[in-house]
């Protein structure tokens, strides 16, 4: 799949961006937000975008988690559709001080899809980290 996507991003960048947005966002997303995100992403310089995509699809998080040297906290989609599998919290805890708070019915851009819920969850995470440092 990775090679297929890399071939598509190289030959039809705009088409790939449009396809990716369908996978990155739930069907219930505000259509104006989806269009805005698609337009912004498709308007980026292709070479850095292709490099970023290539590197992200090859990223092995296990060494990154092991080398983090700090707590790893995420505010994530609860998953269950398209590209989003549920966050593997217990698996990730094998490699780092890891935790995640999950927001249902959002995709890849929680800070844009549901900013009030994202900000609330982010405050929870930051407060929890602050309490643990005392």
Image (spheres, rainbow, N blue to C red):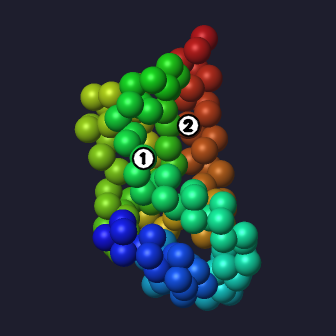
Q: Position of residue 115 (x, y in %)?
A: 66, 62
Q: Residue at x 67, y 79 (%)?
A: 42
For label 2, the residue is: 125
Q: Residue at x 50, y 43 (%)?
A: 74
Secondary structure of the residue carrying tag 2 is helix
Residue 19 can be seen in this image: yes
Distance of label 1 from label 2 (alpha carbons):
25 Å
Residue 26 can be seen in this image: no
88 with respect to 38 (left or right)? left
Which one is earlier in the sequence, the residue at label 1 or at label 2?
A: 1
Q: Position of residue 12 (x, y in %)?
A: 54, 85
Quadrant of the rendering where the N terminus is positioned: bottom left
- Among the 4 quarters of the image, the one containing residue 49: bottom right
Q: Which mark is residue 59?
A: 1
Q: Residue at x 43, y 42 (%)?
A: 100
Quadrant of the rendering where the C terminus is positioned: top right
98 with respect to 9 (left or right)? left
* Residue toward you, 25 or 52: 52
Secondary structure of the residue carrying tag 1 is loop
**Outermost residue, top side:** 134
Q: Position of residue 130 (x, y in %)?
A: 62, 23
Q: Residue at x 70, y 82 (%)?
A: 39
- Among the 4 quarters of the image, the one containing residue 133: top right
Check whether the beta carbons of the residues at disc 1 and disc 2 lie within 8 A of each other.
no
94 with respect to 130 (left or right)? left
Mark 1 crowd level (few <14, some 14–19, many ≥20, 10 Å Cα): few
């Amino acid at each position: 799949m990775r090679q297929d996507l890399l071939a598509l991003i190289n030959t039809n960048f705009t088409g790939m961006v449009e396809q990716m947005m369908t996978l990155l966002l739930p069907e219930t997303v505000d259509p104006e937000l989806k269009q805005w995100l698609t337009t912004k992403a498709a308007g980026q310089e292709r070479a850095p975008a292709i490099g970023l995509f290539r590197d992200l699809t090859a990223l092995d998080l296990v060494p990154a988690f092991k080398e983090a040297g700090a707590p790893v906290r995420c505010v994530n989609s609860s998953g269950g559709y398209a590209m989003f599998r549920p966050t593997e919290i217990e698996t990730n805890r094998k490699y780092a001080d890891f935790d995640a708070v999950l927001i249902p019915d959002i995709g890849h851009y929680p800070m844009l899809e549901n900013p009030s819920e994202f900000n609330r969850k982010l405050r929870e995470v930051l407060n929890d980290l602050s309490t643990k440092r005392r």
